[in-house]
Image (cartoon, grey):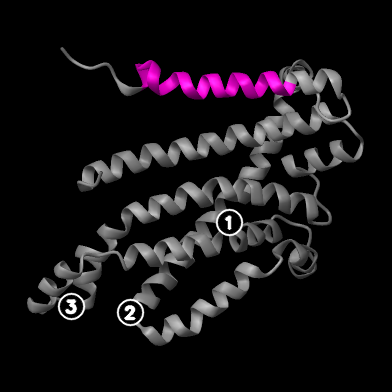
Amino acid sequence: MRRPPDLLRPGIWAPPIVALGLLLGIWQLLAVHYRYLLPTLGSVASQLADNPTTYLANAGDTLSEALPGVAISSAVALLLALAMTQSRIVTRALLPLAVVLNVTPLIAIAPALVVAFSFSRTPKILLVGLITFFPALIYSLTGLRSADPQAMEVLETLHASRWETLWRLQLPSSLPYLFAAARVVVPLSIVGAAVAEMVSPGTSNGLGLVINTASQNSQLDIAWAGIVTLVFFGLLMMAIVVIAEGRVLHWRGFR
């Protein structure tokens, strides 16, 4: 007798549904008694139902900043990680700079980016790239260094070139780490884009602007509708990464 798919087993889907139900119940209870703290679930749902095109259009603007930013930062991080695995001098030169970048309050440089690149999407894309760069670099570097030492020794005895070692061993071994990085930085990029919209002067659209403007005007239902939209697209991007991970790692023989 065949087992049912995992998603159809109550032990898989019941716990998160129960947890979500409890969370929503607590939310509604707080919203009824403390209206200044949270909007009711009904008011948030009404906002989304009455203005779907507004939230989707602003979500499109936010994604148009998040996805290029995370793509650029991931590509640069992987290239730098490749260079760092090939040279200790490069590692000693670049890793401290990456740490400095990671501890820098990047939100504070948003106005300077606007001055440098004008009131366009470029400052927000750059800010997303800066926010997501460090975790992408660390995961990439860890993945490239995770290759089996014995396999490395075998390739050395076969006089494999650095390129052959990289292509045949290090890159395949790093795939689980690269997908783990994607699970972190892709949702983070959406949050980063929304924050960039909140702090960048001259922003005219995006979910970050919707949330910020509504919060300043004490329109909690609109602000939380924007937050819910952000969460939805963050989960959607995460699901795409997980599906791609399952396809690629299954094909490569990873578990």
Labels 2 and 1: the sequence-earlier one: 1
Left or right: residue 246 versus residue 15 is left
| Residue in the picture at 86% in, 24% down | 34
Q: CA distance from mark 1 to mark 3?
A: 33 Å
Q: Which residue is mark 1?
A: 69
Left or right: residue 198 versus residue 60 is right
Quadrant of the rendering where the C terminus is positioned:
top left
**Residue 86 numbered tag:** 2
10 Å crowding of disc 3: few (<14), some (14-19), many (20+): few
Q: In this picture, is 14 found above or below 77?
A: above
Q: Which residue range is magenta in the image? A: 7-27
**Residue 161 numbered tag:** 3
Q: Position of residue 175 (x, y in %)?
A: 32, 54
Query: Given this view, does label 2 or label 3 mark the residue nearer the observer?
Result: 2
Q: CA distance from mark 2 to mark 1?
A: 26 Å
| Residue in the picture at 26% in, 65% down | 170
| Residue in the picture at 36% in, 83% down | 87
Quadrant of the rendering where the N terminus is positioned:
top left
Residue 2: quarter of image: top left
Q: Secondary structure at mark 1?
A: helix
Q: Position of residue 96 (x, y in %)?
A: 54, 79
Amino acid type of the residue tagged 3 in the rendering: Ser
Q: Nearer the viewer, residue 127 or 138?
A: 138
Q: Position of residue 50 (x, y in %)?
A: 76, 18
Tag 1–tag 3 contact (CB < 8 Å): no
Judge whether residue 11 is colored magenta: yes
Q: Secondary structure at mark 3?
A: loop
Labels 2 and 3: the sequence-earlier one: 2
Q: Residue at the far top: name it.
A: 1
